[in-house]
Image: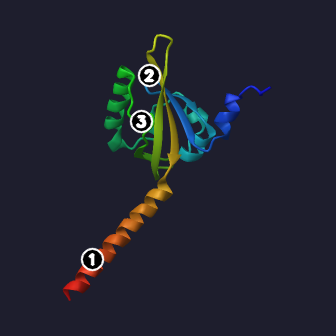
């Protein structure tokens, strides 16, 4: 006999941030990993717009996509990672990757969007540094071959 699944315990235990927003984009669920990642407590985040973690320059594009997804009930990011910049409560930049799931009413109308988010800032910085080192090495090789 299996024990009942404790969803609250699951939400608290996972390492990835889980953020659920309503049709208008207000935060309806903010797990402990979201707090660790973005710096906002659940009390600070709940009911707020996702703008608290979206850089200003990304907001229009985000909201266009968000509202289109809610209107159509279709997302490209159910199984494909979306990688975007984000911001922490203290203002420092993050690089995040996430997938999206839609929650729907009994009539099949989207009611909420669930995002499962991973902080990829360290990986992004490592890749940026490697690209810079590669470009520097190529420049040095080119200069040496022309000498």
Which residue is tagged 2? 23
Where residue 95 sits: x, y (%)? 45, 50
Which residue is located at x 52 percent, y 38 percent?
Answer: 116
Which residue is located at x 56 percent, y 45 percent?
Answer: 39
Which residue is tagged 3? 77
Residue 135 in the figure: left or right of residue 90: left
Badge 1: residue crowd in 10 Å (few <14, some 14–19, many ≥20): few
Q: Residue furthest left?
A: 146
SS label for mark 1:
helix
Report the colour scheme: rainbow
Where residue 11 sits: x, y (%)? 64, 34
SS label for mark 3:
loop
Q: Quadrant of residue 29?
A: top right
Badge 3: residue crowd in 10 Å (few <14, some 14–19, many ≥20): few
C-beta proximity under 8 Å, tags 2 and 3: no
Task: Tell me the distance, in whole angstroms, between the alpha carbons under discs 3 and 1.
Answer: 38 Å
Where residue 61 sits: x, y (%)? 32, 37
Badge 2: residue crowd in 10 Å (few <14, some 14–19, many ≥20): some
Where 133 sits versus 50, above or below? below
Which residue is tagged 1? 139
Where 64 sits versus 87, above or below? above
Q: Which residue is at the front of the view, 46 or 15?
A: 15
Task: Tell me the distance, in whole angstroms, between the alpha carbons under discs 2 and 1.
Answer: 50 Å
Where 123 sits versus 71, above or below? below
- Observer able to see residue 89: no
Q: Which residue is at the front of the view, 58 or 48?
A: 58
Instruction: Indicate which disc, 2 or 1, sits on the residue closer to the N terminus.
Output: 2
Which residue is located at x 33 percent, y 76 percent?
Answer: 137
Which residue is located at x 53 percent, y 45 percent?
Answer: 38
Q: Which mark is residue 100?
A: none
Residue 110 in the figure: left or right of residue 65: right
């Amino acid at each position: 006999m299996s024990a009942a699944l404790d969803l609250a315990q699951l939400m608290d235990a996972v390492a990835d941030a889980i953020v659920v927003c309503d049709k208008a984009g207000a935060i309806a669920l903010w797990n402990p990993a979201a707090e660790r990642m973005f710096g906002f407590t659940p009390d600070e985040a709940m009911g707020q717009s996702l703008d608290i973690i979206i850089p200003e320059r990304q907001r229009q594009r985000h909201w266009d996509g968000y509202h289109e997804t809610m209107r159509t009930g279709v997302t490209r990011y159910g199984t494909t990672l979306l990688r975007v910049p984000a911001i922490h409560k203290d203002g420092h930049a993050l690089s995040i990757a996430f997938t999206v799931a839609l929650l729907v009413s009994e009539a099949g109308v989207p009611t909420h969007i669930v995002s499962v988010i991973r902080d990829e800032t360290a990986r992004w910085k490592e890749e940026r540094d490697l690209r810079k080192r590669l470009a520097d090495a190529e420049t040095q090789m080119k200069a040496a071959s022309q000498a």
